[in-house]
Amino acid sequence: KHGVLSRKSHADMDGKRTPRGRRGWKKFYAVLKGMILYLQKDEYKPDADLSEADLKNAVRIHHALATRATDYSKRPNVLKLKTSDWRVFLLQAPSEEEMMSWIFRINLV
Ligand code: I3P
């Protein structure tokens, strides 16, 4: 699965709130492949062409949990992604349908 997603980092690997200065929204081209959600700067690329930044932004979603972000109302179609290493991301999809599809696909892994 792939498509445009905006990301906001809410909590870091230490379980603590992501500090100010790193809490902004950023738009990516997301590609879910195997157990990894790639958040790429640009549209589709073969694995070999991923930049260092793309690889750094990739999220392992094994044992991750995606839910609708019911406690976040500033933007529509936002899901909350909790990873097995305690990070929390908010991800905004372009539509309700896309958001539900991402939640379903992430939780299937
Ligand atoms: C953050 C940025 C986010 C905002 C966040 C700010 O600043 O303005 O858009 O979240 O508020 O801290 P920075 O880019 O300097 O990290 P919202 O868009 O959700 O308001 P927050 O600290 O209340 O999450």
Image: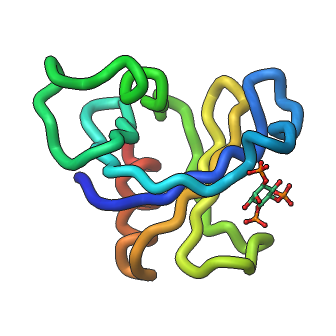
Residue furthest out toward the front? 21
Is residue 109 rendered to the left or right of residue 72? left
Q: Quadrant of ligand 1?
A: bottom right
Residue in the image at 77% along x and 39% along y:
11
Q: Tell me which corner region of the image, top left, top right, bottom left or bottom right, holds residue 49.
A: top left
Q: Tell me which corner region of the image, top left, top right, bottom left or bottom right, holds residue 12.
A: top right
Q: How many labels does the image show?
A: 0
Residue in the image at 28% along x and 59% along y:
3
Residue in the image at 82% along x and 22% along y:
14
Is residue 24 rendered to the left or right of residue 37? right
| Foreground residue among 65 and 30 | 30
Q: Tell me which corner region of the image, top left, top right, bottom left or bottom right, holds residue 100.
A: bottom left
Is residue 85 rendered to the left or right of residue 29? right
Residue 63: x and y in percent read 54, 32
Residue 87: x and y in percent read 69, 34
Quadrant of the snapshot with the C terminus: top left
Q: On screen, 64 above or below 53?
A: below
Is residue 58 rendered to the left or right of residue 31? right
Residue in the image at 58% along x and 46% along y:
65
Q: On screen, 7 above or below 71?
A: above
| Foreground residue among 38 and 51 | 51
Q: On screen, 94 above or below 45?
A: below
Residue 107: x and y in percent read 46, 49
Q: Which colour scheme is used?
A: rainbow
